[in-house]
């Protein structure tokens, strides 16, 4: 399979926007298959996800287990998070490294600029779990099955 400029990889399969111009093979059209179906077609439990193709942020998501939805619990649900997201438009992993170097060294030529740009309180260890849980809660409400109200008969 030729490399593609889109989204999600599970084993040798990929999911994303198809190439409408026919310049490369794959990926499977994300509108035609669910992530669960793609995972079931392979033995791997790891999803590779590329975010921001210009900066090429590459994320690995490991599926530990899939359980039936439990009554009274919201889904999706965060089990663990490590580290924070980098600031937007930081310039990829190399830019993030330079950002940390500038923050850590008060004598670095960009130290003051990076402190000001980041708001001065950037904490790489803080995964901002409360914020993630809040966003998951909004998604869960959005994705929850909607109950249909019975129509009232007109008189």
Image (cartoon, rainbow, N blue to C red):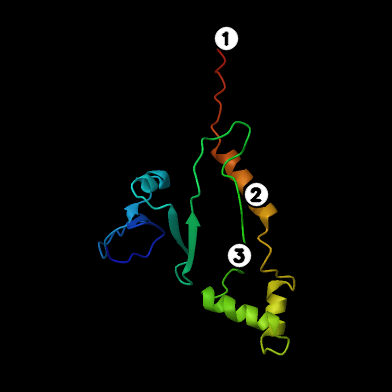
Residue 31 visible in image: no
Residue 75 picture location, percent across and down:
57, 41
Q: Are marks 3 and 2 in contact (CB under 8 Å)?
A: no
Tell me what residue is drawn at x 64 percent, y 53 percent. 132
Query: Which mark sits nearer the N-terminus, 1 or 3?
Result: 3
Give how far across and how far down residue 35 sits, in percent: 41, 47
- Residues marked 1 and 2 touching at CB (< 8 Å): no
Disc 1 versus disc 2: nearer the observer: 2
Q: Position of residue 20 (x, y in %)?
A: 29, 58
Q: Is residue 80 left or right of residue 1?
A: right
Which residue is disc 3 drawn over? 85
Q: In screen coordinates, is 28 left or right of 45?
A: left
Mark 2 Cα within 10 Å, few/some/many (few <14, many 20+)?
Answer: some
Looking at the rendered structure, which numbered label has been put on residue 155?
1
> Could you give the CA–CA distance between mark 3 and mark 2, rounded to whole angstroms?
15 Å
Q: How far apart are labels 1 and 3 at the CA level?
A: 58 Å
Q: In the rendered structure, which disc, 3 or 2, sits on the residue that comes first in sequence?
A: 3
Q: Nearer the viewer, mark 1 or mark 3?
A: 3
**Which numbered disc flags the more N-terminal residue, 1 or 2?**
2
Q: Identify which residue is drawn at 61% across, 47% down.
A: 136
- Name the residue tied to disc 2: 133
Residue in view at x 61 percent, y 53 percent: 80
């Amino acid at each position: 399979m030729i490399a593609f400029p889109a989204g999600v990889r599970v084993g040798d399969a990929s999911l994303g926007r198809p190439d409408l111009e026919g310049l490369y093979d794959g990926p499977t059209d994300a509108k035609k298959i669910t992530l669960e179906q793609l995972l079931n077609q392979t033995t791997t439990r790891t999803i590779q996800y590329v975010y921001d193709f210009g900066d090429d942020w590459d994320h690995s998501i490991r599926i530990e287990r899939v359980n039936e939805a439990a009554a009274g619990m919201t889904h999706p649900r965060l089990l663990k998070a490590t580290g924070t997201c980098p600031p937007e438009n930081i310039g990829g992993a190399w830019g993030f490294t330079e950002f940390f170097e500038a923050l850590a060294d008060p004598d670095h030529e960009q130290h003051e600029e990076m402190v000001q740009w980041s708001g001065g309180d950037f904490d790489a260890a803080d995964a901002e779990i409360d914020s993630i849980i809040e966003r998951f809660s909004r998604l869960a409400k959005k994705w929850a099955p909607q109950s249909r109200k019975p129509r009232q008969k007109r008189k």
